[in-house]
């Protein structure tokens, strides 16, 4: 065999190795992606179980997770107050039935159709603060 024939055979052999490794890497990435998807589903299922447990036990006076229940309640109140602040800033309010954002003047929720409380009754009407301004007027002497 000549030098060039051996070189060509070596290049072809090495190319096959590289192609095989690329296929293996692609397959590994696909398998890792499937594992990641399965783990996501497991995490979602854990969350559903945890939420169901919380909902079933949140009003009990004794539970091994009372501290965590308190943290959840505290965080929910914090979220509620932050959402109220956002609503005041962007001119919306939250539907009591489904939690959707609706225009502050809306009568019905656009998501669930629930009748919304009167926007005027919901807001506390405060009298605008009036500032007295003292104006001094000097009269001219008619001479």
Image (cartoon, rainbow, N blue to C red):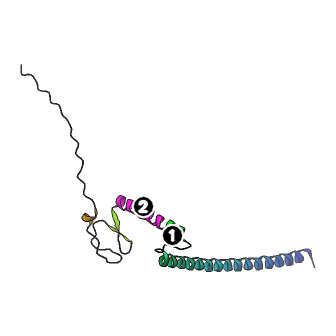
Task: Say which quadrant the C terminus sits in.
Answer: top left
Q: Which circle, 1 or 2, is nearer the viewer? A: 1
Q: Residue 7: percent from the left, percent from the top?
A: 87, 74
Q: Residue 97: percent from the left, percent from the top?
A: 36, 75
Mark 1 highlights which residue?
69
Residue at 29 percent across and 72 percent down: it is 116
Badge 2 crowding class, 10 Å Cα cut-off, few under 14, some 14 to 19, many 20 or more, is: few
Q: Nearer the viewer, residue 5 or 124?
A: 124
Q: Nearer the viewer, residue 74 or 31?
A: 74
Residue furthest top in the image: 143
Mark 2 highlights which residue?
82
Mark 1 element type: helix
From the viewer's perspective, tell me whether residue 49 is left or right of residue 90. Answer: right
Q: Nearer the viewer, residue 113 or 18?
A: 113
Q: Residue 10: percent from the left, percent from the top?
A: 86, 76
Residue at 74 percent across and 79 percent down: it is 24
The segment highlighted magenta reads: 72-90
Q: CA distance from mark 1 to mark 2?
A: 20 Å
Does 77 lie within the magenta span? Answer: yes
Residue 132 image-quadrant placement: top left
Task: Say which quadrant the N terminus sits in.
Answer: bottom right
Mark 2 element type: helix
Our reading of the magenta stretch's main secondary structure is helix
């Amino acid at each position: 065999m000549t030098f060039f024939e051996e070189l060509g055979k070596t290049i072809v052999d090495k190319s096959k190795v590289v192609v095989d490794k690329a296929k293996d890497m692609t397959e590994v990435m696909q398998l890792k992606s499937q594992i990641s998807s399965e783990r996501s589903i497991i995490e979602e299922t854990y969350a559903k179980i945890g939420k169901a447990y919380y909902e079933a036990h949140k009003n009990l006076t004794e539970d091994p997770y009372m501290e965590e229940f308190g943290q959840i309640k505290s965080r929910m109140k914090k979220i509620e107050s932050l959402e109220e602040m956002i609503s005041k800033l962007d001119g919306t309010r939250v539907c009591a039935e489904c939690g959707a954002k609706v225009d502050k003047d809306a009568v019905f929720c656009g998501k669930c159709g629930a009748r919304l409380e009167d926007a005027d009754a919901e807001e506390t009407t405060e009298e605008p603060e009036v500032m007295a301004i003292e104006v001094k007027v000097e009269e001219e002497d008619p001479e």
